Amino acid sequence: MSSSSENLSSVGASYSGMSNYGKSETITSTIVVDSGKTYDGKGITIIASGMGDGSQAENQEPIFKLKEGATLKNVIIASPGCDGVHVYGNNTVDNVTWEDVGEDALTVKGSSSADAGTINISNCTASAATDKLFQCNAPCKVYFSNIKANDIGKFVRQNGGTSYKCEWYINNCTIDKVKDSIARTDSKSTKCYYKNLTVTNCTTWWKFPSSSQVSTY
């Protein structure tokens, strides 16, 4: 996605407080947002240097690490996307643009025994994800609202071969050019709920062990 004001507003973003729009900052290490804190970029573009090439190579560094309860908002992540945003539970991500998704746009971190709580992701735009946008590596509940995604492999994916439970709520999202699926899991306990979902150029929407795991709400 380009950084035009038209595209920024296309997912309902507010211009209030966007004093850094049109400005950029180059970083060489992950920006850590401490527990309970908020990083408000006010529209700034973040460019990573020396943290990864934005391919599917493993061990790239994340642009942002959100500790438990942290919030990220009003940020444009430029290419290379590296390993995107890592969240550690009960986080909010609002009005973030991934211009060119790297390994993943956002990963819910943890393990099968560590519940990451609730993640709210809203008013975001993401483009050019070779594989997935959102990866869940721990049990969690994720609310996706007002998101535009284009040219992706998958919208959301649970770590392959895992059986823990995730709950995904997909609301008012527009998704185009999907190579694999909207949502995919190997777990028989994970559930996906959706409404107001517009999907184009996608052969298979859901890859779940059972169709009963997906429903409208």
Image (tube, rainbow, N blue to C red):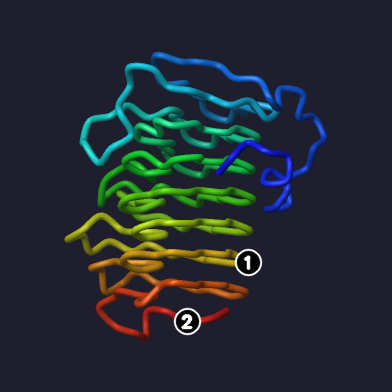
Viewer-proximal residue among 212 and 130:
130
Residue at (37% x, 30% y) in the render? 62
Up-down: is 22 above or below 210?
above
The image shows residue 21 at horizontal and vertical percentages of 71, 27
Q: What residue is pinned by disc 2?
A: 215
Q: Amino acid at mark 1?
A: Asn
Q: CA distance from mark 1 to mark 2?
A: 15 Å
Dot 2, how many residues are within 10 Å of its Cα: few (below 14), some (14-19), or many (20+)?
few
Up-down: is 127 above or below 100?
below
The image shows residue 163 at horizontal and vertical percentages of 23, 64
Residue at (43% x, 28% y) in the render? 63
Q: Which mark is residue 172?
A: 1
Dot 1, how many residues are within 10 Å of its Cα: few (below 14), some (14-19), or many (20+)?
some
Q: Amino acid at mark 2?
A: Ser
Q: Earlier in the sequence, mark 1 or mark 2?
A: 1
Relative to 177, 12 lies left or right: right
Viewer-proximal residue among 112 and 96:
96
Up-down: is 217 above or below 184?
below
The number of discs equals 2
Relative to 132, 187 lies left or right: left
Q: Where the C terminus falls, by quadrant?
A: bottom right
